[in-house]
Image (cartoon, rainbow, N blue to C red):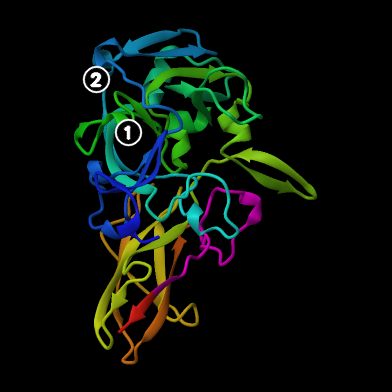
Amino acid sequence: MTEGSQKLIAGKIVRGETPLNLEMPFQQLEGFLTPTESFYVRTHFPIPSIDRDAWWVRVEGAVENPFAINYEQLLELQSVTVPVTLECAGNNRSFLDPKVKGVQWGLGAVGTAEWAGVPLSSLLNRARVKANACEVILEGADGGMLEDPKSPPGKLHFARSIPLEKAHADVLLAYKMNGGELPPQNGFPVRAIVPGWYAMASIKWLQRIIVMDEPFTGYYQTIDYAYWRRREEIAELTPLTEVQVKAQIAKPAEGETVPANSSVRVHGAAWTSDGEITKVELSTDGGSTWNETNLMGQPKPNAWRLWEFNWQTPAAPGNQTLIARATDSLGRTQPVLRDPDRGTYMINHLLPITVEVR
């Protein structure tokens, strides 16, 4: 289905209305930061209505000093501002063959924003984490009943855990997005930002921070947002964590027509975790040959890198297959083929697009 035949809300592609899931048309990618109004929206339940003046977040569990803090008190703490790319763990799901269940995201369940807030470590230090602690659960105010027979009966809240080491390292409790207040659909009044991890870990509408002395095995940690990891002949469900290295083409878009015997700018973005993008290559002949593209700007940790390439199109008309692939500073390159153990998540194999030269 082309963008023209898709339902749009505020310029975004509707992937679901109840709950609300909106995708940025990726061909609109221009600058390093995604405008707040263009940023994709992923929800599992109705968006909670929260009064900022009545909001508190509680820090509890395996701590010596449990406490609660409100919005004004949080604003008084030392803040940091960082650009971070968030990608839905199911981004690109619509390209899987055969089709699978889940929100049918195209290319645009990803975006980069500048997030301002308080390091989670500040609150953990105040709470005095006990020596035997190992994980931190982040719980949102969003919740409801699930129809999945594997889910617990009754209402549950969306919650995920992260290792204590990660929680202390770079996790942010963000209250600003691109310099403005968080919109309700993006987590108002406060959300977590977990750099380098798929966005299911960056809990929105944060209401509880629970320090654990044992691994968390909640629904969205083990049943959903998990993949099969093999230990010799045994496959075990493993929580999703770090984003995988990937490059995407923004323009020209799938099915677009470009002029023959002309210079056409091909551009997009690439991202990874715990490293930086060192190379993006582009093939304009279905993978037979590859050209190194121009990386734009300076690398920033856990934020995408824009790239571009001036393609001299063939003189003869016909279809051409474009493919982008990224390599990062840890030597990881996008795989050619899909790993079936990843289920409906962690989609980073090469995605060819077809354009018409005319």
Q: Amino acid at mark 2?
A: Leu
Q: Distance of mark 1 from mark 2, alpha carbons?
A: 18 Å
Residue 346 position (above or below residue 239): below
Quarter of the image with the C terminus is bottom left
Q: Is residue 322 visible?
A: yes
Q: Position of residue 122 (x, y in %)?
A: 37, 21
Instruction: Give the mark toward the camera: 1 or 2.
Output: 1
The residue that disc 1 covers is 186
Location of residue 249 by image quarter: bottom left
Residue at coordinates 62% horizontally, 19% vertically from top-left? 153
Mark sitting on residue 75: 2
Q: Amino acid at mark 1?
A: Asn
Residue at far front of view: 5
**Which is nearer the N-term, disc 1 or disc 2?**
2
Residue 131 position (above or below residue 29): above
Q: Position of residue 163 (x, y in %)?
A: 54, 30
Quarter of the image with the N terminus is bottom left
Segment colored magenta: 330-354
* Disc 2 secondary structure class: helix
